[in-house]
Each structure stands twice: as C-alpha cells, then as structure tokens.
Image (cartoon, rainbow, N blue to C red):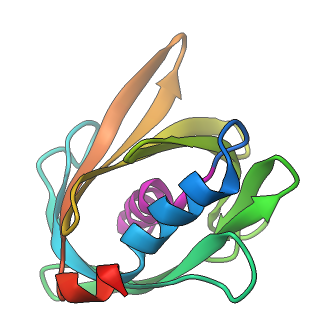
Amino acid sequence: MFRNVAVISLSAFMVLGSASLAASSDEKFFRQVSGQWTGPGEIVAGKYKGTKFICNFAGENPDGKVGMSLDGGCRVGMLTQEMSAKVQRSGKTYVGSFLDGAAGQGLDVVGGSVRNNKAVFKILRNKLSGAMSAHMVSQDKMNVTISVQVEDELVPVIGMTLKKVNPKLASQ
C-alpha cells in the first residue's frame, strides 16, 4: 500500500504541463521545480489516513525539451520507496510515467495545464483516475495535493509540503 501511496504522491508532484499556455510559461514553472526538494507528507483519507512520510527528490529539466524528471524516494519509519518520474511536452499536452507507468505498477500522466504558479494534471491507472496539483507558494516552497475520483467528486488523499534544499539553484 505504501508503494501505491508513494507513487500517487510522486505523481502529484511530477505531473506538470500545459496545452493552453505558451511554452515559455511552462518552461518557467519547470525551472522553478528543478533542484533538490525535501519535506513531509501525510495521507489524509482512506485506510492509511494519518500516515506521515518524508520525501527527498532531485529534479532536472531534459535537454532541449519542455518537461522534467524527478528521482528520489519517500520514507515511512525505516521503509523507503524509491521514486522516479518523467514528464514532457507531447504536442499540445504533457505525457509521462511514474516508476514503470500504468502498464507496470506505476501511473500514467495523461494531460494537464500550468497557470501562473500552479500545475494540475490528470493521472490514470486502469480504472483509477485522479489529479495532482503542485502549487509554487514561493521560490523555495511547493504544496502538492493528490486527489482521486470517487463518483462525481475529486477527493484529496495525499498532501505534501516540499522545501527547496538550495533555493539559489532555482535562479540559475
């Protein structure tokens, strides 16, 4: 279960993109997310409600492409789940995968948008659909929320507050 929660958590963090805005706006957002991030998270709904974890991620922007990759992991007690994610522009939208994508044990990113300092993306795995949002509160702080579709409603299940380890990297 922790693996699924961690995959969804990372999905929320990684799904970043926009079909409706110019690439320069999207590129700015991705540059802000690039760097070293760490911070706490919590499962806020479901069977494991109240479970707290700590994540560490290294973000990079792919050469010559609009998007990003994140590598790292999340820890609950003594257990650590490695994480990796990739997302990049494909036509007028973004596509990506977490871990090995929905064909394996991960998730697929199947669309999204970036507006100002907030990205919202659609995530999918078999019959599970949802959204993840990443809001840049400041240059060195980001809130991430992962929600799942339950009937006609998006229900938040995971929340994280990540802090940039070295904020000076964001301006480079």
Q: Is residue 118 visible?
A: yes
The residue located at (44%, 54%) in the rendering is 12
How far from the left and from the top, in percent, is residue 142?
25, 58
In the rendered image, which quarter is residue 167 located in?
bottom left
For the C terminus, the image quarter is: bottom left
Which residue lies most toward the top here? Answer: 152
- Compared to residue 104, the image places residue 165 above or below, namely below
Q: Is residue 97 a member of the stretch shown in magenta?
A: no
Name the residue located 29 percent from the left edge and 37 percent from the top edge: 46
| Front-lying residue, 21 or 70 | 21
* Chief secondary structure of the magenta portion: helix
The region drawn magenta spans 1-17
Q: 36 left or right of 20? A: left
Where 78 falls versus 28 (above or below)?
below
Horizontally, residue 157 falls left or right of residue 29, namely left
Percent of width and height locating residue 152? 54, 10
Residue 43 in the image: x percent, y percent?
A: 22, 49
Please give left or right for residue 78 compared with residue 8 in the image: left
What is the count of numbered marks? 0
